Image: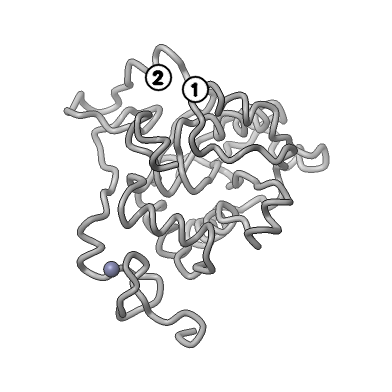
Amino acid sequence: MDFVYPPLCAGCGTMTGQPGALCAACWETVRFIERPYCDITGMPFSHDRGEGMVSPEAIANPPLYHRARAAVFHDGVARKIVHGLKYADRSDLCAMMAGWMARAGRDVIDDSDVIVSVPLHRFRLVARRYNQSAELARALSRLTGKPFLAGAMRRHRATRQQVGLGLRARQDNVRGAFSVPPVQAPRLLGMKVLLVDDVFTTGSTVEAATRALLRSGARQVDVLTFARVASQGDETLYA
Ligand SMILES: [Zn+2]
């Protein structure tokens, strides 16, 4: 394995002891998402509002998904890791990332029956060679023992990259982009689904995917991503 993936830090590329790990300096910069956060959206509160509290945003605009969780903020080294997974051949990072996700998403994992990943359109899949969300879902399935339903959902339109789009444009971009093939629907019927993606930005993508899953008979959809953008204002920078 070392011949294929030399043990380089996933953040800065210096030599480390084991593949898919971070050096001490990079490790220190990773901002893990910890409680207190909104019990529904998973967005951290600036001050502790107590266990089980829900943000005003989630009350004003209740999302279709049940709860969302993420391991880290999408900046610095974490952002490089996501980028490495997306555009470079760093599938060796998946195990480390899935480990962080398993820790951050313990409540939603325990409460789920099956894992589904946010699909890529096949054109983009060819360009990138593999779907990073599916790879994360597969690694998470290995860690947790929850079955991964590969191919449970399809992406119809090759949506524009979400980078640089405002919230409304993002929602329009992904509306109706996902569906569950009829042959897959029985696998989702009555299931509590854990929907996995690499980054949570505005939530438009996971909302659209959640809508498709619920329409096909899923009982509940929780969302687990590796990273999430810290605030809406950062999204054009970090998306
Ligand atoms: Zn490093």
Q: Residue at x 63, y 27 (%)?
A: 211
Q: Residue at x 41, y 12 (%)?
A: 60
* Near-viewer residue (26 or 106): 26
* Amino acid at the residue labelled 2: Ala
Note whether 15 is above or below 64 in the view shown: below
- Residue 53 in the image: x percent, y percent? 29, 23
Q: Crowding near pointer 1: few (<14 within 10 Å), some, many (20+)?
A: some
Q: Secondary structure at mark 2?
A: helix
Instruction: Determine which residue is flagged by label 1.
Output: 63
* Amino acid at the residue labelled 1: Pro
Tell me, yes or no, whether the two marked residues, 1 and 2, touch with CB atoms within 8 Å. yes
**Looking at the rendering, which quadrant does residue 48 occupy?**
top left
- Residue 205 in the image: x percent, y percent? 56, 34
Q: Residue at x 65, y 46 (%)?
A: 119
Q: Check the image and name the residue furthest to the right.
A: 183
Q: Check the image and name the residue furthest to the bottom.
A: 3
Does residue 59 appear to the left or right of 185 in the view shown?
left
- Residue 228 in the image: x percent, y percent? 39, 41
Where in the image, quadrant-wise, is ligand 1 located? bottom left
Instruction: Determine which residue is flagged by label 2.
Output: 58
Q: Secondary structure at mark 1?
A: loop
Does residue 225 appear to the left or right of 194 in the view shown?
left
* Near-viewer residue (167 or 182): 167
- Residue 123 in the image: x percent, y percent? 73, 51
